[in-house]
């Protein structure tokens, strides 16, 4: 089996490779060629931690990501609070194939998902990127969006304004102007990424102009919410996987309150495959509910293993 530890991932995984792996697996999911398994997520008896498994099967890929959230890690151990590891198996035999560090991979695969949505759903003339959220994931989201589309300016809002320099630093690095705004100022944006851990909506329908594409990336748990539910009623809604979107994604609230029907939500893979037209007018609001599926992790991990085995950096252990 191949072992690719966390410390090696940043040198092996490019944003382009993550984008390609995620786009391909979303397409396979919509075509019925790939399947995510039910998610297990349990409270640990110690450390106030949550631990679980996200697995799935796609052409050439079988496995799971094991991991979770240890809220005291940073203070007690100097480690980041999110910890995960991906295990891959041979789909033909079930034999273990690889063990891959999952932390940096998770950030890049999540950013790749919103970027895939921007590539397929944003107006081609989109100029202003709006960021809601300025934490760990936000910087990855912003960088990937700027590499995917030719934006001219980034605007940002965060509940905790002292974190906005995180976004300003990425903008400076990528040589693009950055402007902090209040929420009504988001009407300037052509594309908005929401990536917060909020349990109440920040972005309201009145903060969004016609023609905007919104990628809702923070809501991945029952109860979380970043966007006013009426916005989903007004928008054309896309997602990674409908079952997750309606149960633990941003759409959970609009579906529960009857503003959106589950069968009106389209898997983005259908747009990638060309079986759904995606955006059909310049003033349509499109919204991608990116809940994060196990197959994103497995597809990206598989691409990392291929690279690491090909360039001789993976540790190969006999089984
Ligand atoms: P983080 O702790 O680094 O940042 C949290 C962000 O949320 C900060 O910008 C903070 O100011 C903001 N925030 C906190 N409480 C808020 C509130 N009440 N209202 C508005 N904003 C608030 O977290 P992170 O690692 O950047 O993750 C952000 C979110 O993304 C989390 O909810 C996480 O679970 C989720 N996530 C989703 C995926 C996916 O695939 N969709 C993957 C990884 C993480």
Image (cartoon, helix red, strand yellow):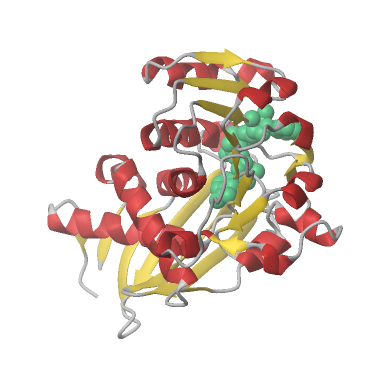
Residue at (48, 53) in percent of width and height:
84
Instruction: Pick the quarter of the image with the N terminus.
Output: bottom left
Q: Taking 138 as reference, is 264 left or right?
A: right
Q: Residue furthest bottom?
A: 93
Residue at (73, 24) in percent of width and height:
183
State the image quarter where residue 10 is shown. Answer: top left
* Ligand 1 picture quarter: top right
Using the image, determine if residue 75 lies above or below residue 183: below
| Residue 291 point in image, percent of width and height | 60, 54
| Residue 303 point in image, percent of width and height | 29, 58
Q: Residue furthest front?
A: 281
Instruction: Pick the quarter of the image with the C terminus.
Output: bottom left
Report whether residue 43 is seen. Answer: no
Foreground pick, 191 / 78: 191
Residue at (55, 55) in percent of width and height:
292
Using the image, determine if residue 237 lies above or below residue 152: below
Report whether residue 141 is seen. Answer: yes
Q: Taking 16 as reference, is 110 left or right?
A: right
Foreground pick, 191 / 26: 191
Q: Residue furthest right?
A: 257
| Residue 100 point in image, percent of width and height | 35, 57
| Residue 308 point in image, percent of width and height | 20, 54
Foreground pick, 98 / 150: 150
Using the image, determine if residue 118 lies above or below residue 65: above
Residue at (67, 32) in percent of width and height:
209
Q: Taking 26 as reference, is 312 left or right?
A: left
All told, the count of numbered labels is 0
Foreground pick, 243 / 276: 276
């Amino acid at each position: 089996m191949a072992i690719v530890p966390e410390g090696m991932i940043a040198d092996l995984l490019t944003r382009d490779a993550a984008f390609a792996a995620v786009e391909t697996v979303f397409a396979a999911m919509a075509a019925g060629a790939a399947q995510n398994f039910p998610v297990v997520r349990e409270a640990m008896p110690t450390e106030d931690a949550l631990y679980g498994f996200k697995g799935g099967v796609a052409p050439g890929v079988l496995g799971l990501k094991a991991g979770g959230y240890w809220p005291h890690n940073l203070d007690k151990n100097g480690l980041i609070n999110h910890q995960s590891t991906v295990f891959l198996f041979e789909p033909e035999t079930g034999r273990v194939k690889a063990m891959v560090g999952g932390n940096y991979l998770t950030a890049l695969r999540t950013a790749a998902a919103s970027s895939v949505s921007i590539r397929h759903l944003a107006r081609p003339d989109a100029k202003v990127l709006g960021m809601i959220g300025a934490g760990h994931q936000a910087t990855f989201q912003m960088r990937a969006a700027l590499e995917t589309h030719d934006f001219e300016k980034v605007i940002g809002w965060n509940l905790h304004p002292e974190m906005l320099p995180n976004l300003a630093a990425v903008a400076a690095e990528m040589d693009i102007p950055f402007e902090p705004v209040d929420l009504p100022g988001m009407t300037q944006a052509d594309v908005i990424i929401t990536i917060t851990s909020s349990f109440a909506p920040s972005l309201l329908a009145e903060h969004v102009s016609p023609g905007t594409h919104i990628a809702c990336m923070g809501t991945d748990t029952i109860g979380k919410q970043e966007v006013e539910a009426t916005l989903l009623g007004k928008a054309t809604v896309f997602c990674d996987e409908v079952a997750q979107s309606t149960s633990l994604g941003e759409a959970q609230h609009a579906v529960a309150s009857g503003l959106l029907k589950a069968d009106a939500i389209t898997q983005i893979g259908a747009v990638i495959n060309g079986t759904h037209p995606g955006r059909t007018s310049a003033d349509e609001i499109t919204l991608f509910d990116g809940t994060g599926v196990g197959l994103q992790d497995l597809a990206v991990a598989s691409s990392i293993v291929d690279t690491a085995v090909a360039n001789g950096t993976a540790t190969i252990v006999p089984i």
